[in-house]
Amino acid sequence: KMPAFPTTTSSTAAPASTPLSSARGAFASTVGVAGASWLVLRALKRRRDRQRMRPSPLGLEEARALDAADSLRHLRADFSFPEGCAAYLCGNSLGLMPKAVTNLIGEELQHWGRLGKRGHFSGSEWLTYHKRVRASLAALVGARELEVVAMNALSVNLHLLLASFYRPTAGRFKIAIERGAFVSDRYAVCSHAAVRGYGGRDGTGAVIDLCARRRGEETVRTEDLVRWLDEHADEVTLVLFSGQHYYTGQIFDIEAISAAAHKHGILIGWDLAHAIGNVPLRLHDWGVDFAAWCSYKYLNGALRGTRRLPGRACARARSPSCDRHACPPHASPRANLPCALPAGPGAIGGAFVHERHCSAEVVAAGDAPPRLAGWWGTDEGARFSMAADFVPGAGADGWQVSNPPILQLAALRAALRGFDEAGMARLRAKSVSLTAYALRLLDALTTGPSSTGESGSTCTGSSGGVRLSRERGRKASFTVITPRDARARGSQVSLRFEPGPGGLDRAAVAKRLLSERHGVEVDAMGGHVLRFAPVPLYCSHVDVLTFVTALDATLASMDDDHDFGRCQVLTT
């Protein structure tokens, strides 16, 4: 509220004015007028924001119809959503907690308290507990059961596998990795080159950033990657690629690229952090040498904690899933709102090793690759004999170093139940539907209103009924950098924003405003990119509509000079 400056009336003569009293009177008059104008403008802006956030009836009707036809919609009830969250679309960063996690972890805590050390051999039998997730993991990556193991965290597994499969020679010692790979992958390959004495002190001289992207294109064509491998085969001994690029959301053709590497005797491994549980995989049939992944993204295998989100936002985050919730408030205080976080992003990961490198026959013949050894990698029948010489167990189990964390395995067991029930074929079909719907709505925001040319008009047809808040040419514009071809994308869609004044990251600003004002959770990466992922296990078409409607209102707000100045303050 603006302070009141009352005026007094009296029959007595007023004292002679002084310069100070005249200044006070002028100030009071100016502030009073400014205050009234400010209150009017604020009221008008709130009304405009409510109109922006209201999806058109056609759009909401279509989204509900698509969800009604979804045979997997019941799985949503198996997950815990953060309080105050209108739409959770960042499963590419951290998946939601399956409700079954609580019971399974509780069981193991009870076994620990009741059995103590005996729990290794009775109750849940911790000695072989990792085998309980083996069949499900094998199905997700398209492998035989002996080829997969749940262990460690992703980067640790990459180091263990690189120790076995990076085999440099004086004439052929380079490692090829895609340009813009996740930095931990790059750190890993550079360090392995360095400790072997290649590529200089930091190993970078032995690592090739494979950039086959054509000018003006955001993603890489498979034929260009294959051509590059053909041209540089004599210097490359190993290729490490990601199944889905974490930044652009592009799915790489694992089969074609692996075949191109093997044609030249090059070993190839894959980082599947953003691919497992996201797209169908057939690692065994594709002949992949090795792969590693984490479980806290699309697999939803992490433990869940809370963090506190400061700032102002909607404490009663609303979704257009029902009519009375079609218009969420924008400025309610949301202090101390819990949000999902893992109990450490290093929740248990997994690894794949093709059976040609680890079958019982290969191990017995002494032809298995060398490795960094630990006692849990020996055959479980002889593990407690404490033999002086290390003899690896058959399969991917032979790359284990220490016994796995049972509570994290219990969380993973709970998470994999949804995949066992749904199957990747049905999940993939729903994923394609969700992202196609999202792209259609986003196109409506970037191409402008319908042919009527009226700002704020309701677009039907390709727009799906999103109510547009601005005409063409808004300042806070974005470009979709994820492939339009459904075969080349997973559940993630990435939007690149134009930089703001002074290089301000508009994607980071939009992410924060979406969360604080609308209860919509997405994530932002450096380089002005906003990522969202409607994960098919627990997301709906109404969630997608909620996000795009909130994004439209957020972009319009960012165009406003006053709000954009506030956004700059929020990000400093």
Image (tube, grey):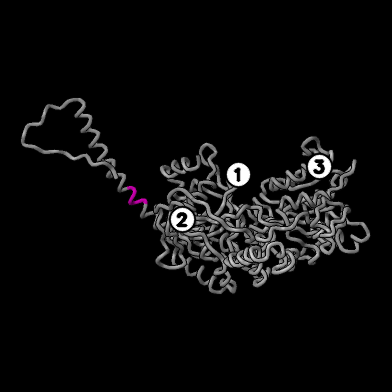
Circle 2 sits on which residue?
Answer: 518
Residue 527: which numbered mark, if any? 1
Q: Nearer the viewer, residue 156 or 458?
A: 156
Of badges 2 and 3, the one in the foreground is 3
Residue at left 43%, top 45%? 563
- 3 or 1: tag closer to the N-terminus: 3
Q: Position of residue 170 (x, y in %)?
A: 90, 41
Q: Position of residue 421 (x, y in %)?
A: 65, 72
Q: Nearer the viewer, residue 106 or 32?
A: 106
Residue 279 position by quadrant: bottom right
Circle 3 sits on which residue?
Answer: 193
Q: Are marks 2 and 3 in contact (CB under 8 Å)?
A: no
Question: Is disc 1 placed on a helix, strand or loop?
Answer: loop
Of badges 3 and 1, the one in the foreground is 3
Residue 362 position by quadrant: bottom right
What crowding class fits label 1: few (fewer than 14 Cα within 10 Å), some (14-19), or many (20 or more)?
some
Q: Is residue 514 above or below residue 144?
A: above
Q: Amino acid at mark 3?
A: Ala
Q: Amino acid at mark 2?
A: His
Name the magenta segment's main secondary structure: helix
- 2 or 3: tag closer to the N-terminus: 3
Chain part drawn in magenta:
41-45
Give the position of the N terminus as an image quadrant: top left
Q: CA distance from mark 3 to mark 1?
A: 28 Å
Residue at left 59%, top 74%? 71
Q: Are marks 2 and 1 in contact (CB under 8 Å)?
A: no
